[in-house]
Amino acid sequence: MHYSIQSLRCSSCGAPIEINQVKCEFCGSRLHITSFRSIPFFTDDMLREQISNNTKNSKDILDLFSRALCLLKLHVFKQAEDIYRSIITQNIENDECFFLLSVALLEGRKPFLHKKNEVDEMTRCIENAILLKPSGIYYLFYSYLIQDYYEKKGMRYKEKSDYYKTKSLELGVSEGDRKILQQFIDWEEW
Ligand SMILES: [Zn+2]
């Protein structure tokens, strides 16, 4: 794993946060999980605590983002999906939101088990994420969607999965990112 504890900081005051905290010791703010890359720091019990931490009706964007990530990690896909949709309709241009909505829409199942209109929505989301911020892991996920849906069914897409896979290799995908993606989806290496 290539994570450093340094990357976990209070989103209100910037104080460093230990992995087992749910509140900031310095300012008392609720801890937010602001990126999928922080997920490995949390056990499932800590994620459940985050969710039950009476933020259910909060409209705060950090609360929403944090909550959706916990739900996604715990495979409560539909609820995570609803939250990402509501964040996106607030005109929040966040690349991770589009990426994670795409992941949530898979519902832990293989792309080829979905209907075409569902896969179309996933590819639209991942394209939005890439437009906002090109990233190796986004391209890798894109490549997986095309390979496991279009190519498995012998259908044509704009580009072949190899095209997106090459892009992901050019940008680089960390081992950590790869491992996290595997926790969200039913995915074997290919
Ligand atoms: Zn703080």
Image (spheres, rainbow, N blue to C red):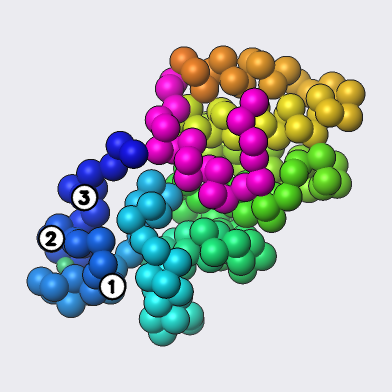
Q: Quadrant of the N terminus?
A: top left
Mark closer to the chain start, 2 or 3: 3
**Residue depth check, mark 2 versus mark 3: number of the one nearer the observer:** 3
Figure quadrant of residue 51: bottom left
Circles 2 and 1, Cβ within 8 Å, touching? The answer is: no
Mark closer to the chain start, 2 or 1: 2
Q: Residue at x 49, y 18 (%)?
A: 169
Question: Would you place residue 189 above or below residue 18 in this image?
Answer: above
Q: Amino acid at mark 3?
A: Ile
User: What secondary structure is marked by label 1?
Assistant: loop
Q: Which mark is residue 15?
A: 2
**Residue depth check, mark 2 versus mark 1: number of the one nearer the observer:** 1
Q: Is residue 12 magenta?
A: no
The extreme left residue here reads: 26
Q: Which mark is residue 90?
A: none
Task: Tell me: is circle 2 under 8 Å from ligand 1.
Answer: yes
Magenta stretch bounds: 171-190
Figure quadrant of residue 9: bottom left
Circles 3 and 1, Cβ within 8 Å, touching? The answer is: no
Residue 58 in sight: no
Q: Residue at x 49, y 36 (%)?
A: 178
Q: Which mark is residue 5?
A: 3
